[in-house]
């Protein structure tokens, strides 16, 4: 079991009828990333948010896909959600992949003007994935969608000249 988590994440969700979110998910561990995506889509639909999914082979490719999308002529999103599932094996590969994707997404958040929500599960085993996709640890896909909505709202508030007087 993990920690307490954010018990109020689903509260205070702003109304953002015109927002657009890109979900980037991996093929690797697709049963898990599919459940994350389903949870996010459920929340996005409940909030009338447009979305599109891009599929990449593995977690390390997520930052590249997001950066490439921002450089494309495609409709730009208000937020990205990154979904992957990295399960520890018997080699150091787990640490390399986790470090790479974490640093990549952190870099995107510091260099892009579009928030990228970290929805990459780093797991010891598949049982932990079940716990985090609707089990006792909540649903990390839903949580990522709520976070995206809140970050879109924050970005819009910060863009307003009178933000500090609210």
Image (cartoon, rainbow, N blue to C red):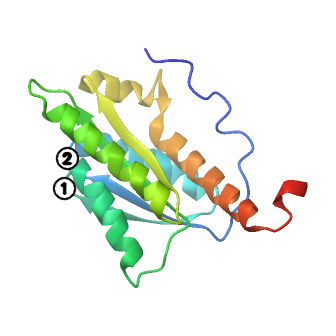
Q: Is residue 140 above or below residue 125?
A: below
Q: Position of residue 108 (x, y in %)?
A: 42, 58
Q: Which residue is drawn at 40% across and 54% down?
A: 107
Location of mark 2 (residue)? 28
Q: Can residue 46 be seen in this view?
A: yes
Of all residues shown, which one is farthest toward the bottom? 73
**Element carrying mark 1:** loop
| Label 1 – label 2 distance at C-alpha | 6 Å
> Crowdedness of circle 2 by 10 Å Cα count: few (<14), some, many (20+)?
some
Q: Which residue is drawn at 28% across and 62% down?
A: 64
Residue pointed to by mark 1: 57
Question: Residue 16: which numbered mark, if any?
Answer: none
Whether residue 34 is visible to the viewer of this picture, yes or no, is: no
* Quadrant in which the C terminus appears: bottom right
Q: What element carries label 2?
A: loop
User: Residue at left 58%, top 46%?
Assistant: 147
Mark 1 and mark 2 lie on one chain; the one further toward the N terminus is 2
Specify whether 39 is left or right of 95. Answer: right
CB under 8 Å between discs 1 and 2: yes
Count neighbours of disc 1 (C-alpha within 10 A) and say few if under 14, some if 14 to 19, many if 20 or more. Answer: some
Vertical relation: 73 (above or below) 82: below
Can you give x and y, in whole percent of width and height, for residue 21 in the image? 51, 63
Q: Where is residue 100 in the image (x, y as percent from the top left)?
A: 26, 45
Q: Where is residue 119 in the image (x, y as percent from the top left)?
A: 42, 43
Q: Quadrant of residue 29?
A: top left
The residue nearer to you, when weighing 109 against 10, is 109
**Can you name the residue that lies furthest to the right here?**
165
Front position in the image: 119 or 111: 111
């Amino acid at each position: 079991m993990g920690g307490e988590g954010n018990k109020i994440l689903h509260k205070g969700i702003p109304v953002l009828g015109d927002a657009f979110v890109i979900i980037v998910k991996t093929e690797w561990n697709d049963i898990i990333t599919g459940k994350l995506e389903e949870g996010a889509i459920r929340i996005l639909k409940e909030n009338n948010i447009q979305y599109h999914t891009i599929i990449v082979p593995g977690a390390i490719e997520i930052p590249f896909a997001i950066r490439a999308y921002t450089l494309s002529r495609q409709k730009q999103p208000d937020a990205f959600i990154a979904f992957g599932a990295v399960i520890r094996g018997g080699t150091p590969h787990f640490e390399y992949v986790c470090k790479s994707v974490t640093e990549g997404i952190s870099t995107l958040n510091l260099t892009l003007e579009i928030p990228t929500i970290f929805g990459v599960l780093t797991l010891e085993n598949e049982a932990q994935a079940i716990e985090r996709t609707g089990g006792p640890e909540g649903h990390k896909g839903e949580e990522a969608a709520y976070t995206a909505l809140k970050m879109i709202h924050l970005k819009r508030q910060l863009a307003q000249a009178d933000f500090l007087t609210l």
